[in-house]
Amino acid sequence: MERTADQRIRTTEWEDVQYRYGNRVGKYKAHELEILAQQIADTSQNTCLTAYDPQAEKVAAKLERGGYAYDKGGEAEGTSFIVDSDDEDEALAAIRRRRLMELQRQKAVERFGVLRHIPGADYVAEVTEASSSCWVVAALIKPGHSDCEALLTVLRTVAQRHRSVKFVSMVYTEAIPNFPAGLLPCALLYKDKELKRQITGLADWQARKKLSLATVEQMLSLNGVLPPIEDDGIEEAVEKDE
């Protein structure tokens, strides 16, 4: 993706025109929020350089979208010949504001999406403190341990599916000195800076002695980390995995 020297996303004129008509194409499709933020920042930085003219701003925006109806026989100078359409312009501006707010809310809620490995020294900041605003699932693992690797594989997918939950993993000896290796893997479920549940081993994550995406999501749901899942839904999912 092409960026400028100051790391701004460079959009094409065609992409900008399409976006004005409500079509998210090109870089707008994957980076809409960042591009809108750039545009807002540009507007804020340039405010003090020119006197604000609301009529001129509406005229420029309208002309970019295809122009206004006007009286060809008129002799007026400037923009006085323009047939005003405040209702349309205000409606479009409101739509853009709502869209930006929706994207900002979505980004704030769905701000994770990956299982991150962190050093044990970051336990307090990344787990305990972070849980003040969201659920945190911290997996204590031992590299190369078969059960740990099996749980991590599923948790990576769960993290992608539930982006409002923070998922991290730590080497157990770094996170909690003298933690018994026989209890691995161990998952710590944190919320509001408190340890709500500690799940050791794989048994609680399984159904019919089988570990799957459905069984892991069910366990997290039962502990309040994820929304409720219907019992018949989990049975169907397990049977499908088999």
Image (spheres, rainbow, N blue to C red):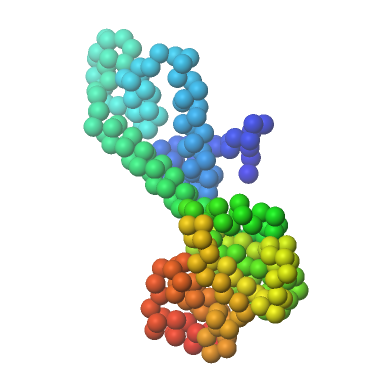
Task: Relative to 188, say whether 209 is above or below.
Answer: below
Residue in front for this viewpoint, 117 or 90: 117
Find residue 76 and report its horizontal and vertical position in percent. Answer: 27, 10
Label count reads 0
Query: Taking the image as drawn, is residue 91 in sight?
Result: yes
Find residue 54 and report its horizontal and vertical position in percent. Answer: 33, 20
Residue in front for this viewpoint, 62 or 54: 54
Task: Relative to 19, say whether 229 is above or below.
Answer: below
Residue at point 57%, 88% (across, down): 209
Query: Taking the image as drawn, is residue 160 in sight?
Result: no
Find residue 199 and report its horizontal and vertical position in percent. Answer: 57, 75
Quarter-of-image position of residue 167:
bottom right
Say left or right for 133 vs 173: left
Residue at point 45%, 37% (across, down): 17
Say left or right for 179 vs 89: right
Quarter-of-image position of residue 59:
top left
Find residue 98 and report its horizontal and vertical position in percent. Answer: 35, 42
Q: Quadrant of the N terminus?
A: top right
Residue in front for this viewpoint, 123 or 92: 123
Looking at the image, the residue that sits furthest to the front is 178
Quarter-of-image position of residue 184:
bottom right
Q: Quadrant of the C terminus?
A: bottom right
Residue at point 47%, 66% (across, down): 225
Residue in front for this viewpoint, 196 or 162: 196
Looking at the image, the residue that sits furthest to the bottom is 208
Say left or right for 20 vs 160: left
Residue at point 58%, 57% (across, down): 127
Task: Relative to 224, say whether 79 is above or below.
Answer: above
